[in-house]
Amino acid sequence: TGIVPQKSVMEVKEGVEISSRETNDSGALSEEQQQKLDKFKIKVRQENEYYFRDHPEIQLMTAGVMKDILNKQPDDPQTFIACSSKTCFGFLAAIVLAVIVVTPCDGSYAFQAFRMQQYQLHGVSYGCKSALVNMEVRLANSDLILRRCIFTRLAELTVDKFQNLINNGAGAIVILLPSEFYTSTSQNKEEWLELEHQIMEEEVPVPVYFAIEDSNLTSIYSEIQQSADATSGSTAMAAILDSVASFGYQIYSDGKESRPESDAKLINYYGKLTGFGIEEQLPTIAFVTHYDSFGIAPGLAYGYDTNASGVVALLELARLFSSMYKSGKMQSRYNLFFVLTAGGNFNYHGTKKWIDEELDSADSNLLTDVDYVICIDSIGRSENLHLHVSKPPKDDTAGYTLIKEFKQTADMLGINFTLVHKKINLGEDLLSWEHERFSLRRLPAGTISHFGNHVDKGRRTIFDTRLESNTDVLEKNVNFIGEAVARYIFNLSSLLQEKQFQLLTDELSIHRDFIDTWMHQITKQPRGAQLFTKDHSLLDAFEQVMTAYLKDVKKVTMRPDKKDPEFVFYDSLIMQLNAYRVKPALFDLFLALGIVSYVGIVYLIVQNMPAVAGFVASFATKSKSKSD
């Protein structure tokens, strides 16, 4: 009978089962097995070396034991080492237990925070300069705020307090927004709008975040407040002891420091409806609106009124006139143009780029025969509408006739419509209204808005939410714009005015469901211009709906100039902040003193073991003699 090979199993760290090859020596390793074993030994040695480097206390223990062996030269070194190891192990265990009992981090909570604006426009910086946070938390009324992260509630913050925090060296500021701030009273919102506006006027050197206050953040805030109250004891010693016994919080931000966006872009969409006749010889009416919103924190800028209402109005008008133009009998002798622009809150940069390309292109005549450009900006909150113009049109112009039609239609529908004239101030860095981009190129244009003044703080705020607006108002205002333009392009003003007859009724009426659906779609996510990436779902939705109702829909992507960028966006606008429950720095000092004292006492006992042993022995002898 031959020799039956046996199977040897070696358990390596990877859990690989290694079998011996069939040889005369059943315990021999194959060449492959030997190589694996050698690699495993090398790996184990490396891991052990790394472990020793990470745990220098083991080296100290070993050195101490060897020193005792050389000094005392025991008769039984193995027993001596075992006793010494137990002593050292007990010592380390005591330290570990002490650290575990007073572990500095007792819990943590991660929450979403929205960073304050950070961008550059025409070389001027705005917003906060930094994003990283890793510091202890204090409240705004604390005596020590230098290089601390300050927690403050919006209701407790004023412009003066904010400036004092910055001037006194606060390392970061987290502003807690009440969970019900969307539905707060108008009086509170007026104060918050003023605060938001003034904070945005200056560049802030430290990170500023906004967070919606929930139950966990409320608990953290209350605990910090209680800790601050506890440390204000009647005596200095009482304050120190209370500080050691209390807990605090450390804020840490996940992510990286803010950097300029390397692929910042603005994307415009436009399409048209062609009138009856030769397209190149027909006049044009253009509807223009920007789709981005603005606020002190881009991640909180949902912008229902400014300017989701304008976007929904443009899309509904595109649907409405598309249904007319599909029928040859309802096709007017006007081309209609619909434009969604980006960067409206960045000096209408997307509008500027589009105008420049259209007017400077030899192949395009879209704007050369334009009768009027109607810009729509914030029409979802009031039936009092204003048409802002840079120059009132002359009596014999198409613009004058169209504005007259707006006034007559407003009287019929019960809309309070007024014409507001404001000259363009070329000395200012920022334009006031979108139509001014067209007026600078001598194109007749105006902006319809319920805002009577361009400096109204409600135009750029995070407090613009759907709860403040009314779908009925928006529907009525869209119907007003559509009715007036339809009367103008079909030249039906005099005929319909005598009979007080409305053109947009029945199949041609405004679709409320369309308005509600798109308003929900647009306002369910923030629309800061910096947040629109190339794969943003809302941009795809814009392109799809415009393609469904318009012809020759085009998407135009614009990037800033590399040498002299008109705008610069920064990242890290929506971050996760982590609040860790920790002991104060004073506790670390007390803990260090305790450990040093413990180590010192143990060291003295070990170094004077004969004296200690004699003292213990004499004490035991005295106790025994007394008992006898």
Image (cartoon, helix red, strand yellow):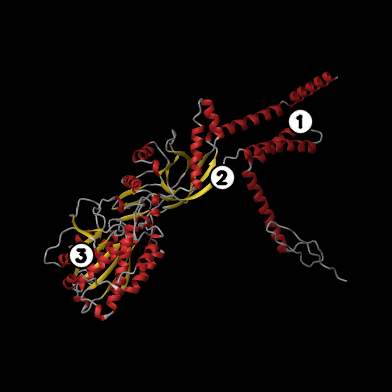
Quick check: 197 above or below 465? Answer: above
Q: Nearer the viewer, residue 66 or 628?
A: 628
Residue 77 percent across, percent down from the top left: 79, 36
Pair 2/3: label in front: 3
Can the viewer see residue 188?
Answer: yes
Left or right relative to 582: residue 327:
left
Left or right relative to 578: residue 413:
left
Badge number at residue 414: none
Quick check: 544 above or below 205? Answer: below
Say which quarter of the image contains residue 359. Answer: bottom left
The residue under label 2 is 107
Can the viewer see residue 578?
Answer: no
Q: Residues within 10 Å of mark 3 (few under 14, many from 20)?
A: many
The amino acid marked with disc number 1 is Lys
Residue 327 percent across, percent down from the top left: 28, 80
State the residue at coordinates (20%, 72%): 489
Of the two numbered discs 1 and 3 on the same chain, state the one appearing first in sequence.
1
Quick check: 408 above or below 182? Answer: below
Left or right relative to 276: residue 176:
right
The residue under label 3 is 406
Of the two numbered discs 1 and 2 on the same chain, state the one appearing first in sequence.
1
Under tag 2, what secondary structure? strand
Left or right relative to 392: residue 290:
right
User: CA separation, marks 1 and 3?
Assistant: 107 Å
Q: Nearer the viewer, residue 131 or 185?
A: 185
The amino acid marked with disc number 3 is Phe
The residue under label 1 is 72
User: CA separation, marks 1 and 2?
Assistant: 48 Å
- The quadrant of the picture occupied by the N terminus is bottom right
Under tag 1, what secondary structure? helix
User: CA separation, marks 2 and 3?
Assistant: 63 Å
Q: Nearer the viewer, residue 240 or 591?
A: 240
